[in-house]
Image (spheres, rainbow, N blue to C red):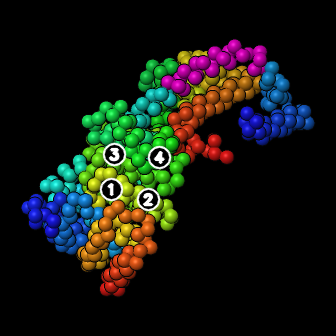
Amino acid sequence: MKNTDTGQPPFITLGDVTKRWSNGVTVLDGIRLDAERGDFISLIGPSGCGKSTLLRLLSGLTPISDGTVTIDGMAPVAAREIMSFIFQDATLLPWRTVQGNVELGLELAGNTTAAARREACGGLLRLVGLSDVAGHYPRQLSGGMKMRVSIARALATRPKLLLMDEPFGALDEMTRDFLNEEVLRLREVDRFTTFFVTHSVAEAVFLSTRILVMSAKPGRVAREIAVPFPFPRTSALRSAPEFLERVGEVSAALRTVKGAH
Amino acid sequence: MRKMFKEALWPAAVFLAVLALWQGACTVFRIPPYVLPSPPQVFATVVERHASLVAAFRITAVEAVGGYLMSIVVGVLVALVFAQSPVVRRSLFPYTILLQTVPIVAVAPLILMWFKSGASSVMLVAFIICVFPIIANTTQGLISVPRNLVDLFAMANASRASQLLKLRLPHALPSLFVGLRISAGLSVIGAITGELFASSNAVGEGGLGYSITYANSQLQTDYLFALVITTSVMGCLFFFTVTGLEWLCLRHWHESAMKVDAD
Ligand SMILES: Nc1ncnc2c1ncn2[C@@H]1O[C@H](COP(=O)(O)OP(=O)(O)OP(=O)(O)O)[C@@H](O)[C@H]1O
Ligand SMILES: [Mg+2]
């Protein structure tokens, strides 16, 4: 829509993306979607509807059966250079310190010196408030801290696209709210585009520019709901009537989808 | 320090109780020394013949360590090959199980017959019984990397080499140490077994295994006991060395090493 002015193709295009497993089950059926730079898109829907699968298709970790995925003009595997994946568990390497974990992405990319990595990751750790634990090992951290390390690691390579699969699903509500604000804060610094899978409607509304409500068997985008609240958003938004109204709308859409079978 | 003292208290108590029982049995039943020498007699023999005990210890230790180191190198290499593909693993793993199930007492004389009887053949016997636990445990560690971590490396376009060096090997380290701990004790058993057969070929003279057969044939039961004690000391020494190394390598991140400083 914005792009009609510039004539540029959208940042991400999914053209009739279909995924069939080898056992013949169709998990995603004809997903069509354009995403602009800076979009924060939440995927919400019943368990098993294919949200994780969609992220894995975008990352190229799972091959597509039919259709096309284009990210910044590239196929998913080639586009890995510009994206990071944040998994539900923090997936930290237990034998590396916090600093070592955050440096992993840059280290594997291989075009930086050790000093440059230390410098860049030190700055990032300051940004997420983890400087004090830079030398700690993951086992010494709480769940929320581990997740922050995981986020810092993902951002260290300055990705343009961030894929997050229920990153805060295992955390308590206070930590989750806190990290939601943190994600938005980091997004102000570096305007990455995000696909975010969640089961929490409030979280989706708080973070997103768009929410895709998915239906299951086969997975389709049943409804798209835009979230027009301006950024930066603060925790005050959570108690605003228009916020609660939007939460109600998404919840209702989710109920319809679940009631379908 | 105090904690260490507390830790040692119970084992020490058990030790003293066993000694007391042993001494009691010797006096009460008046067992002749060539059947069961009393603790003071054994102690006297250890002191008196410490020179030959130390010499025997040295010879056997070299053989055991040699076989052990060989089994680490070969075991890790084989595990690396096994970790490459399930097909390789499925077709070759059964044969490594053979290594463990074939009775070493049957294989040892063959090895000593085929190869020149001597220290290197004894090492080979030790190697054979040490290598299986290392292969099995290291392979398990290499292939049990969580899928998410593999995906993480794939997302970073990591090369096979860096996946191996920075993910699979460190992840396999705790499992490797499980194998190393088991094999540490086995290496001593292997070396002793090898020597038992080497001695009949009139070589390998002087090792603990050789001396055990000798003491046995001469009915020097007190010396036999002294040799058994020396052997146990060697086994414990190996075991604690490996455990210490494990603690050094894993203390920061792995549960098995963390227990030490847990409570
Ligand atoms: N490799 C696979 N082979 C076959 N079926 C699979 C595979 N991976 C996932 N599935 C199936 O595909 C469906 C969608 O899975 P997916 O993990 O994408 O769901 P989800 O929406 O993320 O669910 P949840 O909310 O529980 O995480 C599920 O029914 C799942 O069992
Ligand atoms: Mg999922």
Which amino acid type corresponds to the residue marked 3 in the rendered image?
Answer: Ala
Task: Determine the residue located farthest toward the top in the rendered image.
Answer: B51
Q: Residues within 10 Å of mark 1 (few under 14, many from 20)?
A: some
Earlier residue among tags 4 and 2: 4
> Which residue position is annotated with label 1?
A187
Magenta-drawn stretch, dominant element (helix, strand or loop): helix
- Camera-nearest label, 3 or 1: 1
Q: Could you say which is closer to the camera, residue B117 or residue B78? A: B78
Q: CA distance from mark 1 to mark 4?
A: 18 Å
Whether residue A189 is visible to the viewer of this picture, yes or no, is yes
Q: Chain of mark 3?
A: A
Q: Which mark is residue A179?
A: 2
| Residue at 15%, 68% in the rendered image | A1
Local SS, label 3: helix
B53 part of magenta stretch:
yes
Earlier residue among tags 3 and 1: 3
> Which residue position is annotated with label 3?
A156
Local SS, label 1: helix
Q: Chain of mark 4?
A: A
Q: Could you say which is closer to the camera, residue B79 or residue A261? A: A261
- Camera-nearest label, 2 or 1: 1
Earlier residue among tags 4 and 3: 4
Q: Which mark is residue A130?
A: 4
Residue A13 x %, y % = 16, 63
Earlier residue among tags 2 and 1: 2
Q: Chain of mark 1?
A: A
Residue B128 x %, y % = 47, 33
Q: Residues within 10 Å of mark 4 (few under 14, many from 20)?
A: many
